[in-house]
Image (cartoon, rainbow, N blue to C red):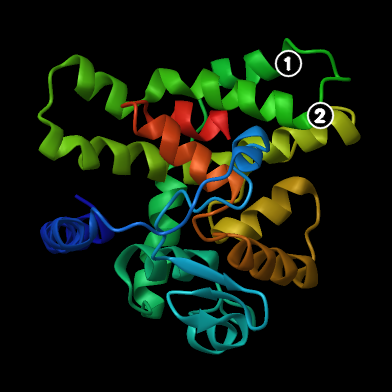
Amino acid sequence: MDKIKEQFRDTFPGIVADTKAFLKENADKTIGEIKVGQLYGGMRGMPALICETSKLDPEEGIRFRGYSIPELQQKLPKYPGGEQPLPEGLFHLMLMNEIPTEDQARRLSNNWVRRSNVPVHVFKAIDALPNRTHPMTQFSIAIMAMRTESEFARAYQGGVHKSEYWDATYEDSMNLIARLPRVAAYIYRRMYHNDQHIEPDPKLDWAGNFAHMLGFDNDEFKELMRLYMTIHADHEGGNVSAHTVHLVGSALSDAYLSFAAE
């Protein structure tokens, strides 16, 4: 078991207990009115998801676990010689509610490298589409093609107890995060660089490797990608994507189905 999963496993019972206590005390409370116009407008303005990982304030901007972007730029681990935070560090912060050490961020980078191998049939599914296909359509199809690797689907079919759903969901989520840059870069190079693809560099961090596979192999762009991926990693619970993933997942769909839906 990898270190961050082991740490999360040990923390998980406390999270479950806190959630149950919160629900017991607040389940019957009303947090807003629902108007007919909102229902016709796709739930616009309706609070639909409790989110602990980030909050978007109209005055202060977004905060992740209470930290502003400038604070994260100062506190989160950085790539050797770099100045911008690593997305791996923010992932650890959102999952564990603590600022990670440089060693923890580096281990997470290595973890994603080990998980990043994309099955050949996924690339074949992309290549079967016309080049004019919208990039997001190609991306969604690739995610669905990767569902053959779903740990949750296998565990659920095998009758796993619901108390263990988190384990397979964790595996699917980590595998998706690790593989998505490879898929996105493949689609980009297919559409805009005549199918001239660039192999991943396992020595690089997650965002730096994404920049490399896109074809931007200078340090400035890699730093920009690290910052970009950090500040776009979460967008509180009220946006369409977060709500969709939560809604689809609540029907016992795996991470691949949930993520493709958004």
Q: Is residue 95 left or right of residue 68?
A: left
* Residue 163 spot, x, y in % from top left: 11, 39
* Residue 220 spot, x, y in % from top left: 79, 72
Q: Which residue is mark 1?
A: 127
Q: Name the residue rendered at 23%, 42% in the picture.
A: 166
Disc with the residue nearer the chain's start (2 vs 1): 1
The tally of labels here is 2
Front position in the image: 244 or 231: 244
Q: Is residue 16 left or right of residue 60?
A: left
* Residue 97 spot, x, y in % from top left: 33, 72
Q: Which residue is mark 2?
A: 190
Mark 2 and mark 1 residues within 8 Å of each other at the beta carbon: yes
Q: Name the residue rendered at 63%, 46% in the picture.
A: 44
Regarding mark 1 in the picture, which secondary structure is present there? helix
**Is residue 141 depicted above or below 43 in this figure?**
above
Toward which corner of the image does residue 10 lie, by quadrant? bottom left
Q: Amino acid at mark 1?
A: Asp
- Quarter of the image that includes the C terminus: top right
Residue 82 visible in the current orientation: no
Q: Name the residue rendered at 62%, 59% in the picture.
A: 207
* Residue 89 spot, x, y in % from top left: 46, 70
Q: Residues within 10 Å of mark 1 (few under 14, many from 20)?
A: some
Query: Cα distance, mark 2 to mark 1?
Result: 9 Å
Regarding mark 2 in the picture, which secondary structure is present there? helix
Q: Name the residue rendered at 77%, 31% in the picture.
A: 135
Residue 198 visible in the current orientation: yes
Q: Amino acid at mark 2?
A: Arg
**Is residue 230 depicted above or below 61 in this figure?**
above
Front position in the image: 200 or 43: 43
Front position in the image: 262 or 4: 262
Toward which corner of the image does residue 8 lie, by quadrant? bottom left
